[in-house]
Image (tube, rainbow, N blue to C red):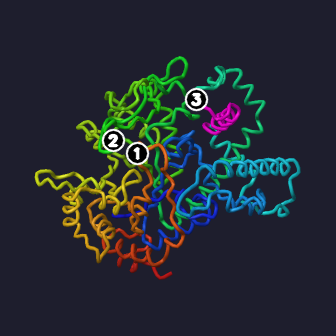
Amino acid sequence: MRASGILMHITSLPSRYGIGTLGREAYRFVDFLERAGQTYWQILPIGPTGYGDSPYASASTFAGNPYFIDLEELLEDGLLDASDLDDGLFGNDPEKVDFGAIYVNRRPLLRKAADRFVSRIRSEEASPAEEGAAPERRFTARAYRTFVAENAEWLGDYALFAALKDRFGGVSWQDWPEPYKNRRSAETESFALEHAAEIERTKAIQFFFFAEWNRLKAYANGKNIRIIGDIPIYVALDSADVWANPNDFLLDERYAPKSVAGVPPDAFTDDGQLWGNPLYDWNAMKKNGYRWWIRRVSFATTVYDTVRIDHFRGFEAYWVVPTTEKTARNGRWVKGPGYDLFRAIREELGDRPIIAEDLGVLTPGVYQLLRRVGYPGMKIMEFAFSPDPTFESDYLPYRIPKNSVAYIGTHDNETALGWLGNTDPETRAFAVEYMHLTEEEGYHWGFIRTLLACPADTVILQMQDLIALGNEARMNFPSKAEGNWQWRIRPECLNDWLADIVRRKTEVYKRLNPRLLPPKEEERNAPGADA
């Protein structure tokens, strides 16, 4: 099925409260997608962010980002007061997230709401109201208890990790006192008992997130709009995942990484990218049946409709950098688990909808793995336009295979107009000629038209390109430590005029959401069709 969608992270949605949330503007964006004829909404990872605000460096691969909780829902449910929602607390720039203000001012409100919620449900459970007498609420004791039970595999570890992190001033768990580095030490277990209230507060905040998330996802799915989520191949060293499962990672006896992840020099940087994530102990994971990865994929493909796995080539071979290095230049390739991991996942979970982010340095082994797993790969049109007549890029639109997801650029790339303005004159001239770009049509629409026409089953457009923004709206500059992940869209940009233009182009290139297509003749003539 030919289809299309839009990439825009939740943080980029409009909001009165400094950052996009799972509230009314998210529902309005789903309505925009429906009117525009789209089938997919692609987002970035939704986990809690830390230093640098990167969604790819989360304290948990399972938890949700509390910043996305809609404060107005908490207000309507009696968990916050109107006086709590002072717009100025969260940043005043409608086009940029102020993560500093969000960190300082949202956390106390969410803790206040969680404490009220826990107090309320304990009171209700102690003195149950007569049937029909209790007020209707979005967040109920029964739903909370179900959530805690269904997510017990990760929720308790994450909530305990968060409480310990607060206790030790927010420093990385590698810098905690020795006994608490061990998830299963007697001291850690005693701390859990002594700080049960703080741990339950974190569980309640996670409940708020997933209750709101599930309602939004159900709303989107009801319009046949599918959410493409994103999981990084690696997890952050300072995370509940590594702390609670150290045997799945290559750590020494003091829980320090033996070596770290990155990628070699590439088009983004001459020194490569030194990510610093701990590496998996694939031998240990194989012995336990890849249990952690199976849990991760099972969870992700439940939370999302489709999952994009970032840096897929790392499953075939991954770049290993000594911990003493300051750049990723002096690393080496090491063989990954290959198809064995995905065989285990399929045997346990069956086929799951996965997109393989297969960008970077690709080898015959990577191509072979992609063929075996059968997942669609990714094609980036900005990489296509070499003016060298002897070189045919795999990213040229006519060469893009059907079983792929095609983009002008992703969150790691320039916008279409930013790329066009920054590329060299020869490449620009070739791109203009190839795509028949004209000022009259609008250069960005020429990019979009070319992408929609390509053979890929699925194409994803960045929201910034649909509203003709340059690199001032770029989401991420790889290897740049600050200033990323901040772009937000103005609410007036999500309008019916734009949606109708996008829908018409989507129709022309046969990518319209099938829910919006008229019934086929045989369906119209089927018995009972007029009922």
Q: What element carries label 2?
A: loop
Residue 56 falls inside the magenta stretch: no
Q: Who comes first in sequence, dot 2 or dot 1?
A: 2
Give the CA separation, mark 3 to mark 2. 31 Å
Residue at the (76%, 50%) spot, across then down? 112
Q: Does residue 126 appear left or right of residue 482 in this picture?
A: right
Q: In which quarter of the image is the N terminus?
A: bottom left
Q: Position of residue 102 (x, y in %)?
A: 63, 52
Q: Where is residue 343 in the image (x, y as percent from the top left)?
A: 38, 36
Instruction: Say whether marks 2 and 1 touch (CB < 8 Å).
Output: yes
Work out whether residue 408 can be spotted. Answer: yes
Mark 1: secondary structure: loop
Q: Name the residue under label 1.
A: 478
The amino acid sitting under disc 1 is: Pro
What residue is shown with label 2?
Answer: 269
Q: Mark 3 points at which residue?
A: 243
Which residues are the magenta region?
153-173
* Type of amino acid under label 2: Thr
